[in-house]
Amino acid sequence: MLKIIDLHATVEGEKILKGINLEINKGEVHAIMGPNGSGKSTLAKIVAGHPAYEVTGGQILFEGEDILEMDPDERARMGIFLAFQYPVEVPGVSNSMLIRQAVNAVRSERGIDELDPLEFEDFIEEKLKLVEMDDKFLDRSVNEGFSGGEKKRNEILQLASMEPRLALMDETDSGLDIDALRIVSDAVNKIRNSENAFMLVTHYQRILNYITPDKVHVLINGRIVKSGGKELALQLEEKGYDWLMKDQLVNGEA
Amino acid sequence: MLLELVDNALVNTAANKSLMSARQNAYNQVQSIPFPTSKDEDWRQISLKPLTSNNFVAAKSGDVTSIDIKNYILKEADASHIVIVNGFYRDDLSNVSGLPEGCFVGKLGDAPAHVVEAFEKHYSNVATYKSDAFVPFNTAMVRETVIVYIPKELKVEAPLQILYATDANENIFSNARTFIFAERHSDMTIVEDFVGKEESIYFMNAVTETVLSDESHVTHIKVQRESTKATHISRTASLLARGSNYNAYTISLGAALFRNEPMALVDSENAHATLDGLVIVNGNQVSDTHSIMDHLKENCTSHQLHKVIASGKGKSVFNGKIFVRKDSQLIDSFQENRNLLLSEKAEVFTKPQLEIFADDVKCSHGATIGQLSEDEMFYLQSRGLSKTTAQQLLTYGFALDVIENLPVASLREKLSHDVAELTTDSDVEVTYLES
Ligand SMILES: Nc1ncnc2c1ncn2[C@@H]1O[C@H](COP(=O)(O)OP(=O)(O)OP(=O)(O)O)[C@@H](O)[C@H]1O
Ligand SMILES: [Mg+2]
């Protein structure tokens, strides 16, 4: 589904990604872990098409198609969804207005009839139940004044509504309390199927207890320095990143 | 220019003696006060050429030939609206049957004695703009003043809409004049709505005076959606008595050149004035707002949020004067001018001007000029919304905190629609603020 080949990227002239290779197949969940500032969010944002990052080399293929030249909205309509580490507040734009437009944008791309406001009400009610969110959040401005956890849950509400093929979840677990983490994880497990895929950026093993990853990758200093199964996450929890950083230096110097 | 247009024959058509002398006075002032030039500090940033280069003529009739008046009437004002066309009062198009008893809206000639008395006392004494020829020109030449009188202890539920329409085949000038008097503890919402035949060239010179008695509440919405070739000069002055509450919202979308001069004279204790504004300029439109918030007594509050969306080669000037006089302690005054620049060719000038002579006051003021945020754009686009839709939503969001305060639902709806439309013209080349 997603194939990243030797991806290099800079922001404001600074090299952030230094040759990323990653392949995610449909039906899979991949976890990306790594220290602060290593480039995890950058990777997710570049896949989603953030204009501030410049890709200086490599390729990103989605369903076999090179997407690097595509605008973020085109990518979204093709089925790529980014749940933000820091969801953006959009004053004056109501949450329900945004989600309805988002849902209809992907529906029309998929050749499905758009939802009118009444149909949308029924549609969103289901999704609200899935993430156990109160409908009062629909009338509020997007993320404005939401608590940290509420923002994260709102991202998953949008994810559930847009039914992406590839969901990039950037630290969705940070800021969620224990119950919320369970609810969000349950929702993801319900959405998960053999046709979609997830890339899950996290610092903690905790969420991986609920959402079992097929692969775990460690991103350090713009490179994936180690990949493994779910046991790698446990190892990281125990040992930290130091042992991998040493490896990386050796590699870097070699 | 005004000098050439002022006509003594019309000055002499007053319905009452004190009005007659006000008109004569005003006539004399027009003769003696010079027409502003770009050398005047207060007129520096704009050119009045559209006024001087067109040969404006007086309107001959109030006939409606091309615009659909009904289309402009707000649903909520179905039985509470007055229509003036080209300065001519149109009884036949007006309907105030929905207003409660005791509330008078109409012409001076039809007004009961106590309304005439209030009128005589305050008319022309509120709109006291210094060295200004436009108000006197209006006073001398206006055909009919719309008088709004709200009796004491009455809350009028329906909003009153006063529609000033311009519809002519020549380049006409006309004067609009509204006089609002709110008795003690009264409460009313008034919408002054300026519209015109599309693409037509004309000059609208408008003056509104609002007098608020103790504890009265007036919400005053001015909507300017003139022809995009019109020139619109407007003064809205208010005088606030003890405990009164004046909330003015000036929404300006149309006209090639417009100048708004809202002025609140907060002349008694415990009063509150709001002078909020929303300006949208596109194409070659020029907007100029010179406002005065004058605190003359203690314990008052004021609020001024002036929002501007400038695209194309649009230009906006904001000069907001706030005075806090020597004896007016414990004033809490807020002023903010926020400008959203949607194109590189749009221009914005902002100048907050505070003159504070009292020591125990709280005045906050600020001005920002910015583009749409790249992060907000990316967020919306990552939800599948096209660039155009994302721009539209963000711009609408920017305008919303002015629009959402308007207590007339159909107007809110209409304006949000207009905002979306005005900001998505194909000539809008958007630049973003890097995060
Ligand atoms: N827009 C930007 N401008 C300047 N520097 C940036 C920008 N975006 C990212 N960076 C830098 O790129 C590096 C990688 O950042 P990124 O957000 O991808 O890290 P991360 O792995 O997600 O970290 P964390 O675990 O703290 O979320 C950091 O050093 C960061 O400061
Ligand atoms: Mg990050």
Image: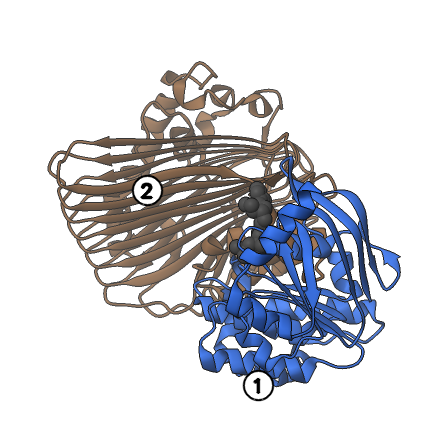
| B337 vs B158: above or below | above
Amino acid type indicated by mark 2: Asn
Query: Mark 2 belongs to which subunit?
Result: B
Q: Is B48 positioned to the left or the right of A251 in the image? A: left
Chain identifier, brown in the render: B
Residue identifier under label 1: A129
> Quarter of the image holding residue A16?
top right
Farthest residue in the top direction?
B39
Q: Can you tell which mark lies on residue B408?
A: none
Chain identifier, blue in the render: A
Kindly state the secondary structure of the residue where label 1 is placed: helix
**Residue B15 appears anywhere in the view:** no
Count neighbours of disc 1 (C-alpha within 10 A) and say few if under 14, some if 14 to 19, many if 20 or more: few
Query: Mark 1 belongs to which subunit?
Result: A
Amino acid type indicated by mark 1: Lys
Inter-mark Cα distance, 2 to 1: 70 Å
Look at 67% across and 75% down and name the residue there: A213
Residue identifier under label 2: B16
Look at 32% across and 48% down and name the residue there: B303
Q: In this rendering, which labeled residue sits more in front, label 2 or label 1? A: 1
Kindly state the secondary structure of the residue where label 2 is placed: loop
